[in-house]
Image: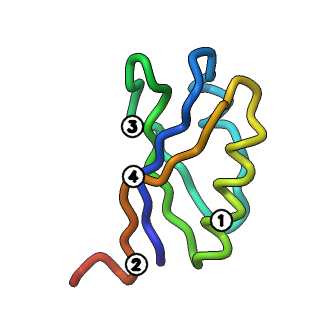
């Protein structure tokens, strides 16, 4: 399992569009708005490849100008 906090940059990014995106082997949770920056997401993926694919999918959402990884954790989280 790989977990990540991600900033989705863009002034006109729809939280609903981010929530409704189907990611395959990853799941997202919208944490909230980051005023002046965009939206912060928590992503849980089965593998680094799945996380990479999810980040690429988010980059294609209308209004997104950037996708920045803020934190990354690998393993089961019980370390």
Q: Are marks 1 and 3 in contact (CB under 8 Å)?
A: no
Q: Residues within 10 Å of mark 2 (few under 14, many from 20)?
A: some
Q: How far apart are the two marked residues, 1 and 3, measured between alpha carbons?
A: 19 Å
| Residue 59: x %, y % from top left | 71, 43
The residue that label 4 is drawn on is 70
State left or right for residue 73 relative to residue 22.
left
Q: How far apart are the two marked residues, 4 and 3, measured between alpha carbons?
A: 13 Å
| Residue 43: x %, y % from top left | 50, 56
Which of the two discs, 1 and 3, sits closer to the camera?
Answer: 1
> Residue at the location (57% across, 17% down)?
11
Q: Are marks 1 and 2 in contact (CB under 8 Å)?
A: no
State left or right for residue 15 relative to residue 35.
right
Q: Residues within 10 Å of mark 3 (few under 14, many from 20)?
A: some
Q: How far apart are the two marked residues, 4 and 1, measured between alpha carbons?
A: 14 Å
Q: Are marks 4 and 2 in contact (CB under 8 Å)?
A: no
Q: How far apart are the two marked residues, 2 and 3, measured between alpha carbons?
A: 20 Å
> Residue at the location (64% across, 54% down)?
55
The residue that label 1 is drawn on is 52
Q: Are marks 4 and 1 in contact (CB under 8 Å)?
A: no
Residue 29 vs 1, above or below: the answer is above
Residue 78 vs 26, above or below: the answer is below
The residue that label 3 is drawn on is 31
Location of residue 78 by image quarter? bottom left
Q: Secondary structure at mark 4?
A: strand
Q: How far apart are the two marked residues, 4 and 2, measured between alpha carbons?
A: 14 Å
**If you read the primary sequence from the N terminus, does the residue marked by circle 4 or circle 1 appear first?**
1
Q: How many marks?
A: 4
Q: How far apart are the two marked residues, 1 and 2, measured between alpha carbons?
A: 14 Å
Q: Nearer the viewer, residue 55 or 45?
A: 55
**If you read the primary sequence from the N terminus, does the residue marked by circle 2 or circle 3 appear first?**
3
């Amino acid at each position: 399992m790989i977990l990540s906090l991600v900033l989705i940059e863009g002034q006109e990014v729809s939280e609903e569009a981010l929530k409704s995106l189907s990611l395959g082997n990853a799941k997202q949770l919208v944490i909230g708005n980051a005023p002046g920056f965009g939206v912060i997401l928590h992503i849980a993926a089965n593998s680094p490849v799945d996380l990479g694919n999810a980040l690429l999918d988010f980059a294609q959402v209308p209004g997104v100008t950037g996708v920045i990884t803020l934190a990354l954790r690998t393993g089961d989280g019980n370390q």
